[in-house]
Amino acid sequence: MSRPLSRVVIVGSSLAGLQAAESLRAAAYAGHITMVGEERHAPYDRPPLSKQLLSGSWDPGRTRLRPGDAIDGLGLDWRLGLAAVALDPERRQVRLADGSVEDYDAVVIATGTTPRQVPNPLRLSGIHTLRTLDDAVALRTALDAEPRVVVVGGGFIGAEVAAEARRRSLPVTMVEALPVPLSRGLGSRLGQMCADLHVAQGVHLRCGVGVSGFEGDGRLERVALSDGSVIPADLAVVGIGSEPATAWLESSGLTIADGVVCDPFCRASRPGVYAAGDVARWRNPLFDEVVRIEHWTNAREQAAAAIATLLADHGLGPEPAPYAPVPYVWSDQYGRRIQVAGRTVGAEEVTVVHHEPDNGSTLALYRFGARLGGVAGINASRRLLPFRTMIAARVGWDQALAAAAA
């Protein structure tokens, strides 16, 4: 017999958290919903932080995911600026940083990730990460001072920060441990195309080398590299990935392994607990692969899937389908749109099926076994979309190549 559902707690006032609340209300759930968020801001959109907000073309208020009346219409009990510090699945309680306790019939974990750091034992100022709205505002202010910039990490966030710094005509060095920036997600050929674009725009690339430390007197003056060289700098932006925000769950008894481990229906390992977004780790039936995806589209889609399961478990909805998405992420750099759909990391073969040097348009397909597993494009949105659909349909590699040739 299913447990009655009258109190839902959502931990994480993120896109996934907001989507979970909206999905509950859209399903005519009229019970109590508590939204717990460590940040003081109402839910906001993260992709613009390294794009429009950093450039100054948007003000912070424009990043809000929904207007105030839409947020108010959800009828949520907000706990903003207050972190969750423990989960007790036996008592079905979430304990907050102020000592208060929220009871639940079901809880949705959507706490996202925290950025990885380079050690800064001297506690120098001038070293930034970019994850939150406050991070972006602080970084924009720092860029206004026209510093010498070192970007640590050549992933999408680092590349977008470098592009914005160059738009401002600031001196920029990008340090990437891999031989080619963005190659982990794009492969070496498309990664090299992006690297060439950055070099053409004046970025100084240092690849195949890591950061050994930061130097200065009170504030950053130099970035020391693992090869013994030193780069003068006034500002460093560290973009070397992130880790799931699960420290608060250490005593919960949940299975934690690079995220909250879930089944294919977004259920965590204890009854009444669900997870969605960057913090969730599950086996994606589409690829039969255990994954944790830090993409905007996944946060929205997985939250809706988690709520479908939650409602079904309480007898309030039909049996859910396994959550089997085609991952999708995009980046904007120097007026180019870079898009990736499906799997690309570890591909057995990468084939460029379209390349027009004059307009910078390129499309590549990624093979896993006999199937099309992924697609990536630069300025190739219309060409990419059909292959994203093919990935969902489990189309074979030969069929995908034939479609590309046609």
Image: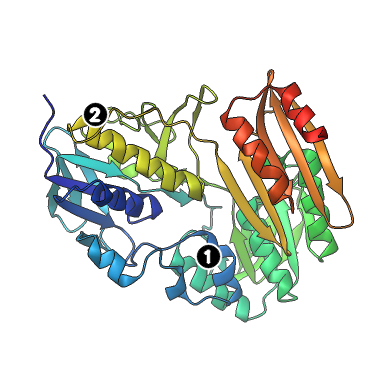
Kind of residue indicated by mark 1 = Leu
Q: Where 267 falls versus 158 (above or below)?
A: above
- Residue named by callout 2: 270
- Counting residues from the start of the chain, the first of labels 1 and 2 encountered is 1
Q: Do the residues labelled 1 and 2 touch (CB within 8 Å)?
A: no
Q: Where 246 falls versus 372 (above or below)?
A: below
Give me the disc on residue 28.
Answer: none
Residue drawn at the location 19% of the way across and 47% of the way down:
29
Residue drawn at the location 73% of the way across and 64% of the way down:
335
Judge left or right: residue 293 versus residue 261.
right
Q: Where is residue 34 in the image (x, y as percent from the top left)?
A: 19, 54
Kind of residue indicated by mark 2 = Arg
Q: Where 150 falls versus 350 (above or below)?
A: below
Judge left or right: residue 120 versus residue 193.
left
Snapshot quadrant of residue 157: bottom right
Give me the disc on residue 49.
Answer: 1
Describe the element under mark 2 as helix, strand or loop: loop
Q: Which residue lies furthest to the bottom in this view?
A: 145
Residue drawn at the location 58% of the way across and 77% of the way down:
57
Judge left or right: residue 37 versus residue 353.
left
Snapshot quadrant of residue 187: top right
Q: Can residue 128 be seen in this view?
A: no
| Residue sitting nearer the eye, 251 or 197 | 197
| Residue sitting nearer the eye, 54 or 20 | 20
| Residue sitting nearer the eye, 153 or 235 | 153
Residue drawn at the location 55% of the way across and 36% of the way down:
326
